[in-house]
Image (cartoon, rainbow, N blue to C red):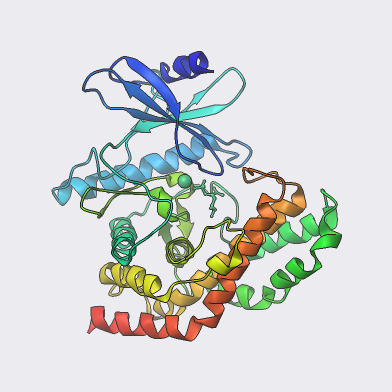
Amino acid sequence: MMEKLRKIANEFQLKGEIRNIDSLGDGFINDTFIIRTEGDCPDYILQRKNKNIFPDVPAMMENIRKVTDHIRKRVVKQGGNPLREVMTVIPTTGGKLYFVDDEGQYWAVSVFIDNTTAYNKADTEELARKGGEGIGKFQAMLSDFTEPLAETIKGFHNIRHRFLQWDEALLRDAAGRVASLKEEIGWIESRREEMLDFWKMVEDGRIPTRTTHNDTKINNILFDENGSVLCVIDLDTVMASTSLNDFGDAIRSYTNTGDEDDKDLKKVSMSLPMFRAYADGYLSQRAAQLTERELEYLAFSARYITYEQVLRFLMDYIDGDTYYKVKYPEHNLVRTHAQYKLLQSMEQQYDKMCSIVKELTNKYTK
Ligand code: GN1
Ligand code: MG
């Protein structure tokens, strides 16, 4: 394996001799490695992109190139460090943004940014505040980005599209699990209409479409030694959508008092202080730019994305675990239950979440 990885790594324009290559992180989709080099040369991230999930890796890499080129210019203009504050994609020796190995697998390399921390959980309000500020700045830097982006995963946060997949999955019943999931399926069906009502506003433009990250959970963000966001990574799903997704997905991750796949549901809930902290950081950067309707639906977006996540985990369980990596056979069902508990906690605290958004909007716009 090691030899194979070395061979692949050597296809890219790396500076320095490779010392070793190790596994890194626990993403659910791609396989990630770190290439350590000798001497002062940078280390690199090597990723095998999951082509079952991203059908057009070249288009995805082109999206990443466009977006990182844009951010790089902004960082330079603001006097920042372009080697640390934006992802740098390393091309192959032939000048391509990806390499296809002899098994048809797609690989890509970017510069590893050292002296940073990626968290799997937000433990302090300060971290949540900084996280919100970071995504707010990220969105602000992309506010004048006008190039077209490919849709790397069709209908990624489009609940109408998800329901098409969902209805098919129920009919197919590929793993023979549907009969045992009446209660869980009911959780999805009972909220179908309200979720579609929200998405209709995105479809007809009442909620604007912008350039968004679409996967803002906390471990896709690098923090520096002062605890500020240094760089937003994992840009595989950068696409045009509603910026509310990025708020909602971050709230799903930062505010959870338990784990995304907690077996102990008593531990899972949405922390309102963490919600306030993240929203405060985010709105400090974005309140003045968002439309009134975006602000009105900011709190709802957390319910929307968490609901969608319940649907996606459950659908994958129904399909026989073909999308997400699982560590044990019931993992997707455990994730479904834990995310549903989180959704219920958001629903119970929804009025308070809305008041907090209003209060913070006033703080940053008046
Ligand atoms: C996946 O790849 P990773 O772990 O950053 C998924 C997200 C889910 C998340 C759940 C392309 O993100 O949409 O919200 O798992 N990414 C893709 O933790 O489907
Ligand atoms: Mg990730």
Could you say where residue 198 lies in the image, as x and y percent from the top left? 56, 75
* Quarter placement of the N terminus: top right
Q: Is 165 in front, or is 354?
A: 354
Choose top left, top right, bottom left or bottom right for residue 110.
top left
- Residue displayed at 43% across by 38% down: 62
Residue 122 % position (x, y): 39, 59
Residue 203: in sight, yes or no? Answer: no
Q: Quadrant of the C terminus?
A: bottom left
Image position of 355 with respect to 63: above or below: below
- Outermost residue to the left: 79
Q: Position of residue 255 (x, y in %)?
A: 44, 66
The image shows residue 27, relative to residue 181, as above or below, that is above
Quadrant of the rendered image containing residue 95? top left
Q: Is residue 258 left or right of residue 287?
A: right
Depth check: give the residue in front, 80 or 274: 274
Look at 59% across and 17% down and name the residue there. Answer: 102
Residue 312 in the image, given as x and y percentages of width and height:
64, 57
Above or below for 21 versus 135: above
Q: Quadrant of residue 355?
A: bottom left
Q: Is residue 337 visible?
A: yes
- The number of numbered discs placed on residues in the rendered structure image is 0
Q: Nearer the viewer, residue 243 or 350?
A: 350
At 24% from the left and 23% from the top, the residue drawn is: 41
